[in-house]
Amino acid sequence: MSTRFFTLTRISLLSLLWAVLTSTALAQDGALINGQPWPDTNGRHINAHGGCILQHGDTYYWYGEQRPDRGFTMDGGITVYKSTDLRHWTDCGICLHTSSDEGSDIERGCIMERPKVLWNERTRRFVMLFHLELKGRGYEAARVAFAESESPTGPFRFVRSKRLHAQTWPFNMSDADILAAKQTNAAQWHEWWTPEWRKEVEKGMYLWRDMESGQMSRDMTVFTDTDGTAYHITSSQENLTLLISELSADYLDFTGKYIMLAPGGLNEAPCLFRHADDYWLICSGCTGWAPNEARMFKAKSIWGPWTQLPSPFQGTASGYRDMPADKTFGAQGTFVCQLEGRFVFMADVWNPRHLARSLHFWLPVHFDNEGTPFIPWADNWKQ
Ligand code: GAL
């Protein structure tokens, strides 16, 4: 028998296995079982990765990257699913399409990652921010993009994409700090990770390097505070340093007020939430699609000072590849939201060979007596 026959048989068997798995993913009440495919109401695994949930009225909307089965670039765009019970999700299709116009920032073949959607009470519009990489340029463009819509299911109109804060210094840097940053020179450092290099990063070496062109923005999230002010939190400066930036009143741009957080700390996948008077930020390390140990930061004000704490994850993902807490159970965070009165950490279990098949984890966030979050393994977010 030919190799082709074996290859075809293997592909059909794998597809069959995938179909069987996707049809057995829900608990009896329809809740997600962490570590298994999660079918939508059509029986297809939910293709909304690096995403977020937005509640509007009685309905929950789940936005995410629509990933192809093979490859890393975008054909379709950003998808949205809706649900009223957080268990059964209806595919509402693509809410922000890539463009067929040559040269468009969002031309088909670009990369759109980690979409986050906000409801703007003042403009009564839904605003989407996402990480954008331009077609054919790998991950070098490092831009944030904005889109808006009158309806939660779209279509979202692309507004702009940009780097951040060109010619603007973080508002909390003193004149002496700025002078020290201006004396750095990124071009002269060929060897990274030496103590001397790290010191220069902490002074703002990459901030200074990108001062004219604007700061890089890759993994990102958004957060709306109780007064309606919204913030963008992103991995900048070659993923070395986080930036927290205030958004303008319409959420479609920045006010220019921002800080650097943990320079040189290599934090990705930021998830920021507020519990009582404390701001919490959970991030991953920086190992591409591979899982790593998370870290957490705490502050009394969004503008800091931020204190770094250990990973909030505890235990082992028993029954699911036995992935330990120090590998975030094999996942990487994407969003923390409040669902039915509890905080839920949403994460992706990336499958870089078949990104569309990447799994979803939802884990309830618990708080100890001091109000510090911890996240033990749970088979589903209701536990
Ligand atoms: C991860 C990041 C993902 C994606 C990936 C590409 O570190 O969190 O969103 O950008 O790298 O390699």
Image: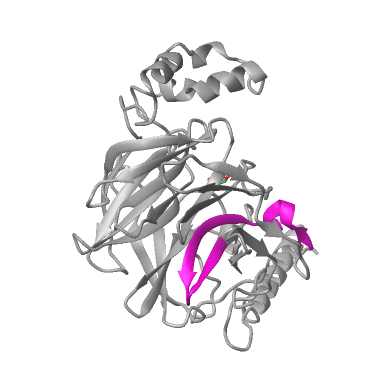
Q: Nearer the viewer, residue 5 or 47?
A: 47
Q: Report whether 165 appears left or right of 63.
A: left
Q: Compared to 238, does 15 lie above or below?
A: below
Query: On screen, 242 above or below 376?
Result: above
Residue at screen point 45% across, 11% down: 183
> Residue pushed farthest bottom?
28
In front of the other: 92 or 104: 92
Q: Quick check: is 45 in the magenta stretch? A: no
Q: Is residue 75 visible?
A: no
Q: Residue at x 62, y 43 (%)?
A: 285
Apparent side of residue 141 relative to residue 321 in the rendered image (left or right): left
Residue 282: horizontal and vertical position, in percent? Answer: 56, 51
Q: Nearer the viewer, residue 62 or 336?
A: 336
User: What is the quadrant of the C terminus in the image?
Assistant: bottom right
- Looking at the figure, which quarter contains the N terminus? bottom right
Main secondary structure along the magenta-highlighted residues: strand
Residue 132 at x, y percent in the picture = 40, 44
Give me the residue at 65% from left, 62% from top: 375
**Is 91 situated above or below 245?**
below
Residue 301 visible from this viewpoint = yes
Image side of residue 120 versus residue 61, left or right: left
Q: Is residue 179 above or below residue 141?
A: above
Query: Is 180 placed left or right of 314 in the picture?
Result: left
Residue drawn 64% across the image and 60% down it: 374
Query: Outermost residue, left direction?
Result: 123
Question: Magenta stretch: residue 336 in it?
Answer: yes
At which x and y percent is residue 124?
A: 20, 64
Relative image position of residue 298 (x, y in whole percent): 54, 48
Magenta residue span: 322-346
